[in-house]
Amino acid sequence: MSAVRLHGVRVPHMKNTAGLKPVRMDIPTVVTIPMSMHIGAPAEPVVKPGDTVMVGQPIAKAVGLVSSPVYASVSGTVKKVDDMLMSNGRFMKAVTIESDGKQDVWDQLKVPEINSFENFISAVKDSGVVGLGGAGFPTAVKLDIKDLSRIEAIIVNGAECEPYVTSDTRTMLDDAELVWEGAALLQKYLKAKRIVIAIENNKPECIKTFQKMCSGGSGIEVAVMPSIYPQGGEKVLIYNVLKKIVPEGKLPIDVGAIVINCTTLAAIARYIKTGMPLVEKCITVDGSAVKEPKNVIVPIGTPVSDLFEFCGGFKAEPKKILYGGPMMGIALPSLEYPIMKNNNAILAFDKKEAEAPEPTACIRCGTCIESCPLRLMPTEFAEAYEARDAERLGKLKVNLCMECGCCSYACPAKRPLVQTNRLAKAFLAADIAEKKAQAEKTGGEGAK
Ligand code: SF4
Ligand code: SF4
């Protein structure tokens, strides 16, 4: 892996809403807030039906090392604390709040006092902020580096390479001060020697804004990146900015890097300034079926259907609805799903855009390998998966696939490569788990 050059694909940008300032939607009558809007252990509800809650009041506490607290996004009455079916097919606890329309703010909110690295990290944890670019990893865990001398550079991710999505672009334009304050906090408490704000060259206004702020020996710099998908992928960005490759099984900090999304950073700075935890999101609403695409600010837990309605409804029957962009977004089976912390867009596409082209036979052209940012071999994955050959899948490193979709996008035969990769990864993981369980039963060596 050490000699690989990171590739990618050129996708149509479709940043239709980049010039549209976010608008606030009317407060929804009901919000449904899942307890797992992050990677790690689900939060544990601390409210029950009948409780009155106010905006910013804790409704669930973080459990374990990798978790994140959850706060009420509207004021009103808790109606239900029960299981809901998530878009990934799993059941998850969720708190449903009926809004009283007043948006009364919790009277115990206070600006956190910060005078050390430890209480900075605990403030980030209390903010409820997780990777808002889509990853959902609890940010406090990411920033809690025991040996700060390991940090060589922090990259603020402003690449936003998915087509259509412009919510980060709006953060960089409308909340540039907050991003800047967030970067200053990282300099102060993480002793970051170098902070690089990485922005794709299809966002000239954002680049101009931060270049202007950077002048004057601030220790913060702007890196203008080519607009190539997936420029915003963590490992891709580390390579393209710092020319370092994160080895298999290692973390960015192992090569001296931390990557933090620009909206995540702004949300941390906002909490530290105001004491208001993460309770709302700016969401790009777009796609060929949407009448009036917009950037909309909504309380977390707002039903997706309310956002589409606010955007004038549909101009064509929606055949595909996505949480996130078209390359890595997750398909939603209905409009009743809620907006979550890590959502940045909801897209709806008509029949023409939603239809997957009929795949034809592989012509062994190698375009999929050439376009893979990690130079993996999707064709080989497909063959090994078809043969249910776990050993070969392991050797081919299917586990490294980040499901970016470049291979499927570039394939002239329109083969559903990323879907196969997903299945192959799950198959390999299950095989490893089974072998480990067997080895434990017999007291032998576990599968590695
Ligand atoms: S989906 Fe996986 S195999 Fe395909 S291009 Fe992305 S990383 Fe490579
Ligand atoms: S890009 Fe498509 S047709 Fe070409 S080798 Fe890969 S799977 Fe086969």
Image (tube, helix red, strand yellow):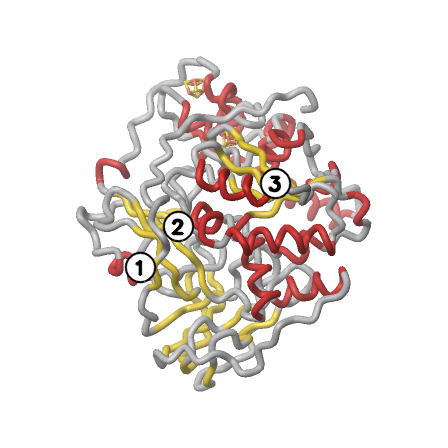
Q: Give ligand 2's quarter of the image.
A: top left
Residue 134 x %, y %: 50, 49
Image quadrant containing the C terminus = top right
Say whether disc 2 or disc 1 marks the residue closer to the N-terminus. Answer: 1
Give the farthest residue toward the front: 216
Amino acid carrying label 2: it is Ala
Separation (CA) of disc 1 from disc 3: 39 Å
Q: Could you tell me which residue is drawn at 63 percent across and 21 percent down?
A: 4
Q: Could you tell me which residue is drawn at 52 percent across and 33 percent down?
A: 231
Q: Could you tell me which residue is drawn at 47 percent across and 62 percent down?
A: 91
* Left-right relation of 228 to 439: left
Residue at the disc numbered 2: 345
Say whether disc 3 or disc 2 marks the residue closer to the N-terminus. Answer: 3
Residue 421 x %, y %: 50, 33
334 or 250, nearer to the observer: 250
- Please identify the quarter of the rendering in which residue 178 is found: bottom right
Residue at the disc numbered 1: 307
226 or 133, nearer to the observer: 226
Residue 276 x %, y %: 54, 70
- 91 vs 221: above or below: below
179 or 292, nearer to the observer: 179
Q: Is residue 308 visible?
A: yes
* Left-right relation of 242 to 44: right
Helix, strand or loop at label 2? It is: strand
Residue at the disc numbered 3: 215
